Amino acid sequence: MEAHVLVVDDEPQILRALQTNLRGAGYEVTTAATAEEALSAAAIGHPEAVILDLVLPDGRGTDVCRELRRWSSAPILVLSAVGDEHEKVAALDAGADDYVTKPFGMDELLARLRAALRRAAPSTEPVLEVGDLVVDLEKRRVTVGGREVALTPNEFELLRFFAQNEGKLLTHRAILREVWGHAYEVESHYIHVYVSQLRRKIETDPARPRYILTEPGAGYRLRAPS
């Protein structure tokens, strides 16, 4: 049996479809249709991942994320309608790990779920590999295709954060908190400057990045080139 997944959505048709497809993929599934049911089911069942609609009849998915993050580190994938950019970013800032926009393909959702569960698995590896990009956390050494890249301390910390969250969407606020601390939360231009510097050093063509991808209005995502 695969991981236990809690699915939260107030649309019966979507809930049934998700339940059927997830069980077909081998997951144990618990469902909930409201925020209250979701928090109760999570407290009782301790799911290893949560798929959460952002709009619920008795509350916001953002609030559910924030509450879950008080005691759970399980990956949270939020489902958002097209145009809900503000709500989507708010949910990511509240602790969600990724998002899928409605209407979505089931293959994409399953792929994102697998990726989220892989990222959540504990790892003691001091060396992170993303395609040809290798980040040695112990030696603080970075190579791309075997070529060593010289990074400043802040550039290294930013790349480390990206590499430790490979494939995950990282919001501007999450990046600022991790790399620069709370005092710099309003200085979002810091991210753009440092991402540009990193791209110049690790990308073959910084104008067409293959590793550090921009998610408009939300943040950045590091992934291996396809």
Image: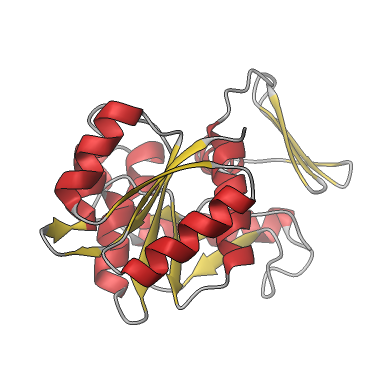
- Percent of width and height locating residue 168: 53, 51
Residue at image location 26% in from the left, 26% down from the top? 71
Q: Which of 19 and 36 is in front in this view?
A: 19
- Give the farthest residue toward the bottom: 83
Above or below, comparing residue 13 to residue 198 in the picture: below
Tell whether 17 sits left or right of 56. right
Q: Which quarter of the figure has residue 80?
A: bottom left
Say if 22 sits above or below 147 in the image: below
Judge whether residue 167 can be spotted in this image: no
Can residue 47 be seen at all in this image of the molecule?
yes
- The answer to whether residue 92 is left or right of residue 185 is right
Q: If the image is split into quadrants, where does the N terminus sit?
A: top right
Residue at the location (44% across, 72% down)?
101
Figure quadrant of the C terminus: bottom right
Image vertical order of residue 225 relative to residue 114, above or below = below
- Percent position of residue 8, x then y: 32, 54
Which residue does the image show at 64% across and 50% down from the upper left?
Answer: 25
Q: Position of residue 84 (x, y in %)?
A: 29, 75
